[in-house]
Image: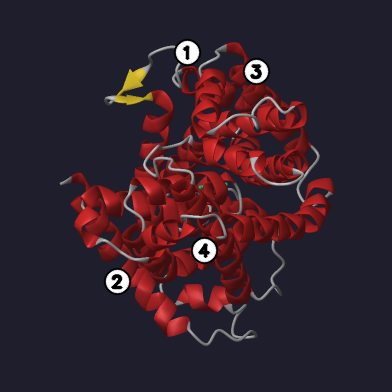
């Protein structure tokens, strides 16, 4: 359940709809689903087995099971964790602001255009979004210091079903708006003329991001698993839940985007503009809106915790730091990296690689996660080889019907497929 909490987050509800919108709709959806099915489930299991077999952080796991240069894959993961968390806290900070905006009604009055203008004014406001990112970072540090599996796990077990129901309510609202059909068509009917190498990179990046895959989060969580936990089933549940929530978010956002005449390719602001318009035009919208963003905040927190946990377990295991200073230092560095991300949304013109800082960090992630996944596949498929099946089944005491398929995917399909996608993206 903790791993599912890690997977379900802003990636599903914020990133997935806007990526789908920006990448042409149905074709992106199909590619994303393809990557989830072909690479996702197998790699989740691969990460979990590395964690359980070693009982260690990503760097330690690759060192103790492989040695040589393999720990570099772990270091790459820790680095990727910093990059993701730095912009994740910025978006999560927006959800805090939105709880307030729903309550005071300031964002849910007026038409789509004026709501869009208020959103832009907020994210380019300088100090407030930066402070909220800091607040979210503090919340994450506090949860990590409290240990995994206590309050937060209980809370998310209770709250995630509520989020699920709320998504269904909002989908009903969204698809029944006049003009919603065009959005459904956009989401579900592939238009291959809109696909290029960049679509491939975005789709694979989204698949990995959404599943929390490719940087060792699942290695870290796997290290807490008892030998008796049947892992293939757990991997399937994580994939199923995460993909379901992403699809629901698509059905919630995209029909409304078309019904209200918004631009599906608007980028990171899409969810944050579309939903207030939906809430502004439904009965008790302010209350629904508040509850929705509160739940999104919790979903983001359970995800951010898994990112910080990777960095913290690494620091605790591999350096002399104890847990508390490790969490504080990592939190400060992430926040420091998050400041330019936040400011780049309109307050200050901060560009790298011709993109604003936040978009650049997110794009870098789309590249780093699949690379991490590729290395993990090679490691488990070839370096550990058939031994990894014994590790999954706890020396044959548990069933794993698809063991041969799994090993085949890790050895051939995933390395070749991921390399192909990344290279075609670069070309
Ligand atoms: N999967 C989370 C989301 O969808 C984000 C996340 C948490 C993540 N931990 C991760 C992404 C590790 C990549 C790697 O919001």
Name which residue lies at 46% across and 22% down.
345
Please state which of the two labelled residues, at mark 1 or mark 4, is closer to the viewer: 1
- Secondary-structure class at tag 3: helix
Q: Earlier in the sequence, mark 3 or mark 4?
A: 4
Residue 45 on image: x %, y %? 53, 67
Q: Nearer the viewer, mark 2 or mark 1?
A: 1
Task: Compare residues 186 and 26 and report the one nearer the observer.
Answer: 186
Give the residue at mark 1: 347
Compared to residue 67, the image places residue 80 above or below, namely above
Residue at the image position 78 percent from the left and 41 percent from the top: 287
Left-right relation of 175 to 283: left
State left or right for residue 24 relative to residue 318. left
Which residue, given by chain and number where applicable, does mark 4 sit on? 44
How far apart are the alpha carbons under marks 1 and 4?
A: 38 Å
Identify the disc placed on residue 412: 2
Label 4 and label 2: CA atoms lie apart by: 16 Å
Give the CA distance from mark 3 to mark 4. Answer: 34 Å
Label ID, residue 131: 3
Q: Are marks 1 and 3 in contact (CB under 8 Å)?
A: no
- Report x, y in % for residue 1: 71, 61
Quarter assignment of residue 230: bottom right
**What residue appears at the point 28 percent right and 64 percent down from the top-left corner?**
417
Q: Provide the secondary structure element on which disc 1 rests.
A: loop
Quarter of the image holding residue 36? bottom left
């Amino acid at each position: 359940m903790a791993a599912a909490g890690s997977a379900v987050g802003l990636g599903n509800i914020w990133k997935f709809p806007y990526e789908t919108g920006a990448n042409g709709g149905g074709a992106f959806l199909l590619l994303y689903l393809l990557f989830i099915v072909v690479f996702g489930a197998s790699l989740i299991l691969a990460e979990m087995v590395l964690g359980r077999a070693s009982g260690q952080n990503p760097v330690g796991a690759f060192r103790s099971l492989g040695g040589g240069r393999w720990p570099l894959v772990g270091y790459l993961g820790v680095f990727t964790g910093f990059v993701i968390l730095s912009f994740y806290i910025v978006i999560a900070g927006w959800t805090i602001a939105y709880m307030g905006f729903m309550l005071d009604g300031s964002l849910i009055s007026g038409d789509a255009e004026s709501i869009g203008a208020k959103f832009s004014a907020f994210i380019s406001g300088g100090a407030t979004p930066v402070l909220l990112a800091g607040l979210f970072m503090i919340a994450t540090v506090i949860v990590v210091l409290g240990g995994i599996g206590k309050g937060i796990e209980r809370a998310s077990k209770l709250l995630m079903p509520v989020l699920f129901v709320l998504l269904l309510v909002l989908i009903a609202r969204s698809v029944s708006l006049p003009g919603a059909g065009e959005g459904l068509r956009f989401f579900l009917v592939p238009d291959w003329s809109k696909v290029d190498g960049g679509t491939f990179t975005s789709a694979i990046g989204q698949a990995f991001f959404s599943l929390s895959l490719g940087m060792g989060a699942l290695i870290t969580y796997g290290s807490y698993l008892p030998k008796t936990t049947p892992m293939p089933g757990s991997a399937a549940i994580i994939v199923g839940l995460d993909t379901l929530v992403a699809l629901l978010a698509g059905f919630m956002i995209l029909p409304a985007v078309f019904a209200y005449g918004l631009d599906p390719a608007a980028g990171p602001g899409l969810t944050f503009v579309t939903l207030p318009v939906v809430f502004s035009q439904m009965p008790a919208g302010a209350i629904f809106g508040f509850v929705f963003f509160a739940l999104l905040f919790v979903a983001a927190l359970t995800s951010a915790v898994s990112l910080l946990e990777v960095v913290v377990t690494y620091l605790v295991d591999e350096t002399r730091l104890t847990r508390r200073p490790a969490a504080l230092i990592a939190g400060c560095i992430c926040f420091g990296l998050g400041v330019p991300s936040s400011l780049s949304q309109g307050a200050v013109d901060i560009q790298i690689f011709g993109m604003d800082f936040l978009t650049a960090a997110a794009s870098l992630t789309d590249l780093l996660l699949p690379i991490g996944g590729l290395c993990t596949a090679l490691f488990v498929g070839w370096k550990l080889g058939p031994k990894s099946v014994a590790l999954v089944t706890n020396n044959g005491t548990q069933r794993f019907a698809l063991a041969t398929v799994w090993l085949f995917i890790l050895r051939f399909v995933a390395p070749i497929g991921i390399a192909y996608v990344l290279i075609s993206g670069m070309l």
